[in-house]
Amino acid sequence: MNRLILATAALAFVVIVVGAFTRLTDAGLGCPDWPGCYGFLTPVEAKANEALALSRFPDRPLEMAKAWAEMGHRYIASLLGLMILTIALLSWRTPQRGHGLALLGLVLFQGALGMWTVTLNLMPVVVMGHLLGGLTVLSLLALLWMRRQPERLELQQPSLVLLAAVALVALVLQVALGGWTSANYAAVVCTTLPICEGNWWQQWDPATAFRLIQPAANSYEFGTLDYAARMTIHVSHRLWAVVTALLLLWLALRLMRHPQLNRWGIAMVVLTLIQVGLGVANVVWQLPLAVAVGHNGGAALLVMTLVCINYRVQSRQPAALRERVPC
C-alpha cells in the first residue's frame, strides 16, 4: 500500500508538470472538445480525418503538437484517477478510509475542472482552480503516506506549530497568485526587477485584476484583461513572494534547530531558494519554457513539503499506544 501511495504521488507530480507544460505552450485548447479530440479518441484519428475534424471546429485548426500535449495530459490524469480509486478501495477497511474517499472525491472534481477548462475556453478562475486542485491531490497523497508511518515525535512548541500553519497559508496564497498570473497571461507584462518598469503604482487596479468571474468572452485564451490589471496581478505575485519566502526561511531555521526536524528544515531552505531563483530567471529570460515548467514543479514540491511539515510538527502520542497500520 505504501508503495502504491508513493507511486501515485509521483504520478500526481507528473500530471502537474505536464499540465504546466500544456498551459505554457498554449495547448490548453489543443483539443477544443472534451473528453475526445475533435470528436475522436486520439489526435492520430483526428489527423486521419482532418477534414471532418475541421468541419466540427472550423476556428480551431488541428496542431498535432498541441493536441498531443492536451490529450497526453488527459491520459495521464485518467491513470492517476484509477490509481486513486485503487487506494480508496484498499483503504476502505483501514483508519484512513475517510482520507481515501476524500482523495477520490477530489480527483473526480478535478476531472470536472479539466472538462470546464476546455468547455469554458480557459476561463481564468477554472484554470487556477484546476491548478490548486492538482496541488491538493498531491498534498493529500503525501499526507496519507505520512499518516501511515509509525513515527513518534513529542514536540511541545506551539509557536512552531503556528508558524508552520501561517507559512502554509501564505504559500497557498502565493501559489494561487501564480496560477492567477498564468491564467491571465500576466507572466511577462513586467520585464524589469525588482518590481516593474515605469510608473506601475499609478496604474494599480486590484478591482479589475482580482475579479474572479470576468466578463463573458468567446475565449479567454491569451487573456482578456488590459495592461493595468495584468500588471497589478504580476506585481502582487512578486510582492507576496517576498513575504512568503521570508516566512518559509524563518520556519526552516526553526526546524533546523530541532534534531528530529533538521532534514525538513534543510529541504525547505533548498526548495525555497531554488523557487526564488526560478522566479527571477523567468523575469530575466522572459519565461523560457523549461524554467517556467520548473517553477510550477517547484511550487508543487514546496506545497507538498510544507503540508508534511505541518503534520510532522503536531504532537504525537507514544508509539506504543498508536495504532500501527500494516504496509
Image (cartoon, rainbow, N blue to C red):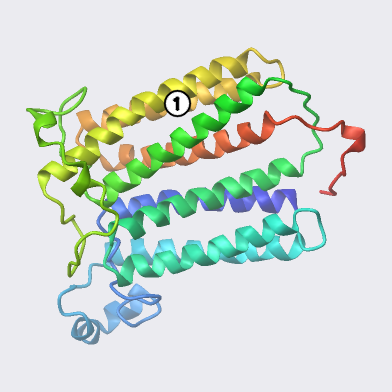
Q: Residue at x 38, y 77 (%)?
A: 36
Where does the image place residue 3, in percent across and percent down from the top left? Answer: 71, 49
Residue at (49, 48) in percent of width and height? 135
**151 to the left or right of 16:** right
What type is the residue that disc 1 sits on? Answer: Thr
Q: Residue at 21% across / 80% down in the picture?
A: 57
User: Picture coordinates of residue 37 (x, y %)?
Assistant: 34, 76
Q: Nearer the viewer, residue 257 or 292?
A: 257
Q: Which sits in the foreground, 58 or 225?
A: 225
Q: Is residue 56 above or below residue 120?
A: below
Q: Is residue 300 above or below residue 254?
A: below
* Residue 64 seen from this side: yes
Label 1 sits on residue: 272
Q: Quadrant of residue 310?
A: top right
Q: Secondary structure at mark 1?
A: helix
Q: Residue furthest left?
A: 198
* Residue 299 falls left or right of residue 278: right
The x, y position of residue 74, in whole percent, is: 43, 65
> Which residue lies most toward the top here?
257
Residue in the image at 20% along x and 26% along y:
195
